[in-house]
Image: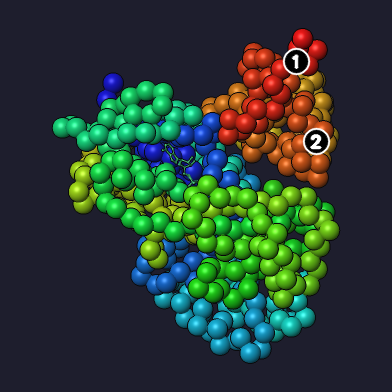
Amino acid sequence: MIYDCIVIGGGVIGTAALDRLARYNLDVLLLEKEDDVASFTTRANSGIVHAGYDCEPDTAKARFNVRGNELIWRDAEELDVPHLKCGSIVVATAEQKNRLEQLKQKAEKNGVEVKILDREQTLAIEPNVADGIQYSLYAPSAGIISPYQLAIAYADRAILNGAKIELSSPVTEIKKVEDGFTVTTTRGEYKSKMVINCAGANGAQINELAGAEHFETVYRRGDYYVLDNSERKNVHTVIFPLPTAAGKGILVAPTADGNVIYGPTAVDTADQTDTATSRESLDSIRANVPLSYKSAAFNKCIRVYAGLRTLIGHDFVIKQSDVLDGYIMAIGICSPGLSSAPAIAEYIEDMVISKLNPSKKENTVCIMPRHKRLMELGDEELDSLIAKDSAWGRIVCRCEKVTEAEIVEAIHSPLAATTVDAVKRRTRAGMGRCQGGFCGPRVMEIISRELNIPLNEVKKGGGASIARYRVKEVE
Ligand SMILES: Cc1cc2nc3c(=O)[nH]c(=O)nc-3n(C[C@H](O)[C@H](O)[C@H](O)COP(=O)(O)OP(=O)(O)OC[C@H]3O[C@@H](n4cnc5c(N)ncnc54)[C@H](O)[C@@H]3O)c2cc1C
């Protein structure tokens, strides 16, 4: 068969694009090299929906961030993705006030509503700002979202609307042929009229494979502390320091799933797979957080993690190739790429429509079924669910209160969760205080049972094994 479009890469950009294209009478396929979508940068970032005040005016970043902020709340509602429009503040001392004025001017150029607040007004929004803070720039349109759940939900809806996703399928070759492209993965060969490169950190390499434009890439790692959900009550908004040339700085923020994060750092690295935190980088978070936030609680840390920014020059590269007809790239999507994703997808949709001129499908899924979460159920509803399915009465993850029923639902969702990490991203089982110490083996048993595979074939994610063989069966 000949596909109309092949999307390479299942991060938030590729899945958002697939979700839009699935609404047309088009055969669309997404190829992802890992065993789940949202497996690289999209799973490890700050999860902030930026307002768009600090992007350089007249850049793609400014344009897509501001439009993305308009669209993302609608998408989160339609897709039932955890989110909260809690606003953000950039904090400053009295001597730094003029830098807030400069940011405000940028915001005005970008069409973003902001307000400079004095200390008293700032404390009304965030009582825990550091004692030296006298002013802040408040952006009411900013907020938080679960980045991986957004990408997963885009993928699920795209599948329900007829798109296909092939996981564990790294693209190894792209050939331009007369009527399109032949795309080869380690698992097969596919033909398509158009190719859309959303391969994140590997975006420039995919361009090389296809013979499209050449770009130099810079990678910048960001490390984080994740705090126990008991800290959530202390953080009411996203607290940024003043931005620097390296980025938006080390923030304090709630997460959409109920934790708190401190980070990220900005460490340049030559290794495009570098997601290991370092002592030095984490120490710089310890040194910086108290400058903006007075209730730092590093003793409540339950995990550290790192994500990798991919930078190509100073802006996103989102365009139809000048040298390869039918080849679109959305690469170098560093921050604010998550916030911009729905707007980038909309732009990709426009480019595909103008090339293929497809008609819209008559019936498509728009509102996704609500995920029932134990933590959000009242006693009556829970009792009636247990009466129909006893799995609702079995709590598997004690820290995050996730039931067996929620895990089973994730395993049988449109894009099936087949690994422990994939279940974790969909249900939060394993994301709490014990980090899967108690529930991990139980989740493995449920995956093994539901997919009818031996326990030692259940992977952690990213191909990593957990159990190798049954100890008692080894000679
Ligand atoms: C530390 C940090 C903090 C950030 N904070 C924010 C924030 O708060 N707000 C915000 O808006 N943005 C933020 N961002 C930016 C945001 O995370 C990214 O812009 C976004 O996740 C990029 O998505 P993507 O789809 O381009 O890349 P990815 O999520 O990396 O997806 C690319 C996918 O392509 C796949 N792939 C690669 N090569 C191949 C191949 N050969 N074949 C098939 N598949 C392939 C990869 O496995 C991957 O799944 C942050 C980024 C970082 C690193």
Q: Is residue 142 above or below residue 359?
A: below
Q: Which residue is mark 1?
A: 470
Above or below, 162 relative to 325:
above
First in residue order: circle 2 vs circle 1: 2
Which image quarter is the N terminus in?
A: top left
Q: To which residue does mark 2 refer?
A: 437
Asked if the residue at label 1 sits under 8 Å from ligand 1, the reply is: no
Determine whether, in the image, residue 352 is placed left or right of residue 287.
left
Q: Residue furthest front?
A: 475
Q: CA distance from mark 2 to mark 1?
A: 19 Å
Nearer-the-camera pick, 51 or 8:
8
Could one spot residue 127 in this view of the protein?
no
Percent coordinates x, y for residue 217 in the rendering: 40, 56
From the viewer's perspective, is 33 left or right of 171? Answer: right
The answer to whether residue 72 is above or below residue 79 is below
- Indicate the amino acid at tag 2: Gly
- Residue at coordinates 39% horizontally, 38% vertically from top-left? 8
Numbered label attached to residue 462: none
Q: Position of residue 458 (x, y in %)?
A: 65, 23
Instruction: Look at 51% across and 34% down and name the residue there.
Output: 34
**In the image, is 155 to the left or to the right of 22?**
right
